[in-house]
Image (spheres, helix red, strand yellow):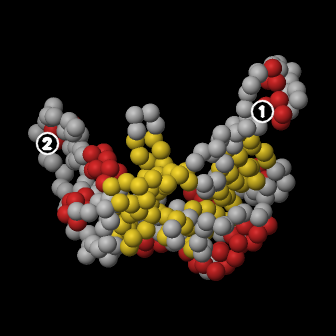
Amino acid sequence: SIKDLQDKVAVYKRSLRSSNISLSAFLDKMNLGNIDLGGFDNAKLDNLSFTQNVPFGYQIYVNLRDGSVSINSNWEQWPQANCQTEACWQQQQVKPNEVPADDVLIGIAQDFVNKYDIDLTNYGKPVVDNAWRATYEATTDKTYAYVPESQRVVYPLMIDGKEVHDQGGGLLGISIGVHVRHKKVSDVWGIMDRTYEKSNYDGVTDEKSIKDYLTTVDHYPFYPMAENVRGGDTPETKKITVELGEPVLSYASFYMQTDKASNEVFVPALIFSVKQTEGVYRQNIVVPLAKELLDQQIKQGQPIPIDGGPRPM
């Protein structure tokens, strides 16, 4: 059942802060020998990157325009498998029993957060993303089943006391990869300025429109191969019925289209869990509760006809 639909909902847009650091203030003279970059007047510094050339060092990227920071391994300084055969590669693949317990992974991530003083003011308790396990269990031949060598610990972003999800239903926030074998943090995504502008939008109050939207999710048109169009046998298709759990009211990240730009917004949403079915790997379905955004999602999801018929308007 769907309850507590509101006439108005609060939608948040992240405020982007342009860099006020001038290039001249950063370097009095930036001359590489082949061009004097310091000669470009009134230039602002948009991005920074720097690299640690030490064992298990990192590459750090800073976007000064939106206040975001990402961290990757400097792979030249991390041990690498030098495999030349398939047997060697198979031996290097991570096995499920090698994955540390969730509390161990979270402990490694938290030590990194503490060491580099990452601000967690707007984030909830960390959780381990174990979505890969469903895919692994569904794979018949475990020889080729994939286990990520970096397990993800997510500190979920919180808005109005609710967790924020991405459009696919996963938790959105600061995502920290922990390398299984090295027991070290390998990468970090999602560190950014969290200043918002708040606006009120018309809410979705029609339960039927939500249920109609659910029936269209992941419905893609079937395009037969060219030889099938010319009269050959059409491959068999299979219809699967998926059962959904009770919805949870949360927030989700979407991109709202305007005439001039596409802006990331955070909107109240219903999160429906997907009960696992053979051939279905989606864990959640997200339904935005701002009417304008739901209408936009429905329009974007309409298939484009291939018979020369009218296009969606």
Decide which of 148, 19 is in the foreground and name it: 19
The residue under label 2 is 232
Residue occupying the point 27% across, 72% down: 2
Do residues under tags 1 and 2 come within 8 Å of each other at their CB atoms? Answer: no
Q: Position of residue 168 (x, y in %)?
A: 41, 59
Per the rendering, the mark at residue 22 is 1
Residue 37 drawn above or below residue 289: above
Number of numbered discs visible in the structure rendering: 2
State the residue in front, 120 or 196: 196
Mark 1: few/some/many CA within 10 Å (<14, 14-19, 20+): some
Q: Residue 174, how many percent across, how many down?
A: 61, 62
Q: Secondary structure at mark 1?
A: loop
Regarding residue 242, the answer to whether it shows in the image is yes
SS label for mark 2: loop
Image point (53%, 52%), residue name:
197
Measured along the vertical axis of the image, is residue 227 above or below residue 91? above
- Res 85 seen here: no
Q: Nearer the viewer, mark 1 or mark 2?
A: 1
Q: Tell me which amino acid carries mark 2.
A: Gly
Image quarter of residue 109: bottom right
Give x and y (percent) for residue 170: 47, 64
Q: Nearer the viewer, residue 312 or 251?
A: 251
